[in-house]
Amino acid sequence: MPQTLLICSGGGHLKQLFTLAPRLGIAPEDQLWATFENGLSTSLLAGRRVVFIPFAAPRDIASTARIARIVRRLLGTEDIERVVSTGASPAVAALPQAARRGVEAHYIESAARADGPSLSGRIVARFPRVRTYTQYPAWASERWRFRGAIFDAFEPGPVRATAPIRTAVVSLGTQDGYGFDRLLSALAPLLAGVEVLWQTGPRDVSAHGIAGRATVPHAELASAVAEADLVVSHAGVGAAVTAIEAGKCPVLVPRLARHHEHVDDHQVQIAAELARRGLAIAAAPEALTGRLLQDAASRSSRTVGAGAFLLDGAPLARTV
């Protein structure tokens, strides 16, 4: 049976592709996944066909080459009719070679990129047979088609009565090599006395007086988010969407490159876009206050119907 290879890096890229797959009209039994192995992927993709690929940090050429060799093997041994990616290094490894073989190749730029394509997007766009899509109509073009956005599935919900914050989830993602001490220093005192699940990535955070967990299985994290009074996270798409899907209005704190918290400042764009839509509160660490956290806890979001995301050359996807 012909398969669609869904390949991307972890975190927000995986969360986006998984959420978009039904809107692409790709049934679970027709999906072959390739992504990094971590708490999110093993939980989110349970029951799906998955090939775990080597972790590739941003701009990691050696690991990208190793991923390309795995993709070459898959293209040679599996009945793959289409390859779809939301980035980052795995997209560069997979899409050009798929296109050269005559396999449909589709790149959906991350919702993190509100003002233009990422480096991975710019690279794959050099290959004419790779079809490219943006999630922002503001920079759509003949090369970059707009077919919708992951955030279209949500809208602000009702404001709830103010109540004390008793439980919270703080989610900082799993990216190795980038800490977020500015956020932890500001947030830990504000959450004193609150029961908190701290998902902090693979760094020692004991200096902040908290017990952090490097990773949390997605099902456990989603359940904790659904039960929490408050969600605070870095401004990654995956963490934000997990909170919004659960009906929360998360506080999103962007990582900044000048503080060595990420490779660039794309999280500023994510936070700004979700704040514009009324789906989150964007704040810098130094702007966090008890009142701001209480405001976020009183707000909500809800899921609404989202239309099909139609890939060029593909049959019309069903509306979900």
Image: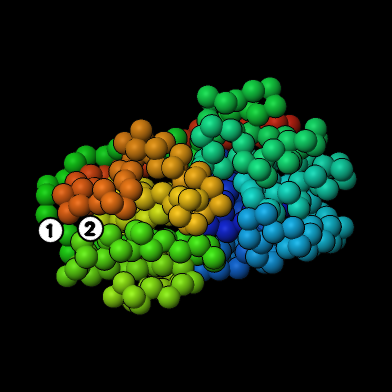
The crowd level at tag 1 (other Cα within 10 Å; few <14, some 14-19, many 20+) is few
Q: Secondary structure at mark 1?
A: loop
Say which mark, if any, is on residue 164.
1
Residue drawn at (31%, 36%) of the image: 278
Which numbered disc flags the more N-terminal residue, 1 or 2?
1
| Residue 194 screen position, x and y as percent | 20, 67
Q: Which is nearer the eye, 304 or 71?
A: 71
Taking the spot 60% from the left edge, 25% from the top edge, the residue there is 140
Identify the amino acid type marked 2. Asp
**Residue contact between numbered discs 1 and 2, judged by CB atoms under 8 Å:** yes
Whether residue 319 appears in this view of the structure is no
Q: Local crowd at mark 2 within 10 Å, few (<14), some, or many (≥20)?
A: many
Relative height, residue 261 to residue 317 (above, below): below
Q: Hey, which residue is sitting farthest top in the picture? A: 142
Residue 181 is left or right of residue 168, and the answer is right
Q: Disc number at residue 4?
A: none
Is residue 68 in view from this perspective?
yes
12 w.r.t. 170: above or below:
above
What's the CA distance linking mark 1 and mark 2?
8 Å
Quarter-of-image position of residue 299: top left
On screen, residue 290 above or below 120: below
Between 280 and 261, the one lying in front of the other is 261
**In this rendering, would 309 be left or right of 156?**
right
The secondary element bearing badge 2 is classed as: loop
At 63% from the left and 55% from the top, the residue drawn is 58
- 256 or 192, nearer to the observer: 256
Out of 154 and 307, give the one closest to the viewer: 154
Residue 87 x, y percent position in the rendering: 64, 48
Relative placement, left or right, of 51 versus 146 is: right
Residue named by callout 2? 229
